[in-house]
Image (cartoon, rainbow, N blue to C red):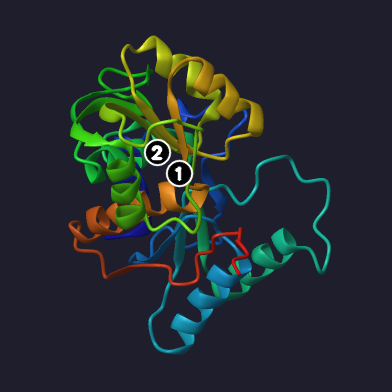
């Protein structure tokens, strides 16, 4: 499959026109690869480490020509490209080695098998609906029913299935609280707390990048807020994307092994 055909297939599923006004989905760098057979490296964030991984694969005989990322390389209009800057170096290497960079961000968040939907599937939620509907049957986040667990056991399930380096949750006097209805949203989802509450009797909300007072806000609304980290809540959707691309019989597709969680936690 040509890269142009792969992108056309993807955009028919996750239309870039659905992106938020502040977002930058679609081509970040297209160095003239559209008519090449797609050899795709999928990642969460397009970084120099991922670019160097793609180049190393080229040098080893796998002619990677597309980095397909969830997070945009370019969020804001650039005023300059200067030597020594990460984005400038990414652009230089992309054109030098003929590697395109394409991004699917808020459009990918909304669709079936997108970031939120994959989280709901991992946790085996049933009767799932969007937290905030945007398209017919699609939208941001997912809320659904969970086979009842104690909060302690639910946290253990999250730790096992997502393997976050750190798991933060709202203060609670009782880890034996029963959890049977759950909302999920991969990435920075704390701004959706009020929307989660409006969906009905939700016991817990799994997302990431939550601030101090957002835990307070959640507690005051009798909602257990769980922060598993940005990387842990969105990386599984990248794995699913690799599976979907493989079903198209691409010449080559793989998940980046150099994708990074930009946070580390010190333990004694």
Q: Position of residue 201 (x, y in %)?
A: 31, 14
123 versus 20 height, above or below: below
Label 1, secondary structure: give it: loop
In depth, the one of 213 and 253 nearer the eye is 213
Q: Nearer the viewer, residue 136 or 11?
A: 136
Q: Is residue 21 visible?
A: no
Question: Which residue corresponds to the image point at 59% horizontal and 24% vertical from the top-left?
Answer: 216
x and y percentages locating residue 36 in the rendered image: 38, 66
Of residues 5 and 250, the one drawn nearer to the viewer in this rendering? 250
CB-based contact (under 8 Å), mark 1 and mark 2: yes
Q: Residues within 10 Å of mark 2 (few under 14, many from 20)?
A: many
Q: Is residue 90 visible?
A: yes
Residue 21 horizontal/vertical position (percent): 59, 25
Find disc 2 in the rendering and name its residue: 108
Q: Secondary structure at mark 2?
A: helix
Residue at numbered disc 1: 104
Which quadrant, please, contains the C terminus?
bottom right
Residue at x 32%, y 37% (from the top left corner): 151
């Amino acid at each position: 499959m040509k890269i142009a055909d792969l992108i056309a297939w993807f955009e028919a599923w996750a239309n870039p026109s659905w992106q938020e006004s502040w977002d930058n989905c679609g081509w970040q760098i297209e160095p003239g690869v559209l008519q090449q057979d797609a050899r795709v490296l999928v990642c969460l964030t397009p970084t120099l480490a991922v670019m160097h991984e793609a180049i190393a694969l080229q040098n080893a005989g796998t002619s990677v020509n597309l980095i397909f990322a969830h997070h945009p390389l370019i969020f804001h209009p650039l005023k300059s490209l200067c030597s020594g800057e990460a984005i400038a170096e990414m652009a230089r290497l992309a054109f030098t080695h003929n590697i395109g960079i394409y991004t699917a961000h808020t459009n990918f968040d909304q669709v079936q098998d997108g970031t939120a939907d994959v989280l709901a599937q991992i946790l085996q939620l049933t009767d799932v609906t969007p937290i905030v509907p945007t398209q017919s049957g699609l939208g941001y986040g997912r809320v659904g029913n969970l086979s009842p667990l104690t909060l302690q056991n639910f946290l253990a399930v999250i730790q096992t299935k997502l393997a976050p380096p750190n798991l933060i949750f709202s203060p609670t006097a009782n880890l034996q609280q029963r959890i049977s209805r759950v909302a999920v949203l991969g990435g920075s989802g704390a701004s959706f707390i009020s929307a989660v509450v409006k969906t009905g009797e939700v016991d817990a909300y799994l997302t990431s990048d939550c601030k101090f007072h957002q835990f307070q806000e959640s507690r005051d609304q009798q909602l257990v807020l769980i922060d598993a980290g940005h990387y842990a809540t969105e990386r599984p959707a990248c794995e699913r994307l690799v599976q979907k691309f493989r079903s198209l019989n691409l010449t080559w597709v793989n998940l980046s092994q150099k994708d990074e969680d930009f946070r580390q936690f010190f333990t004694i």
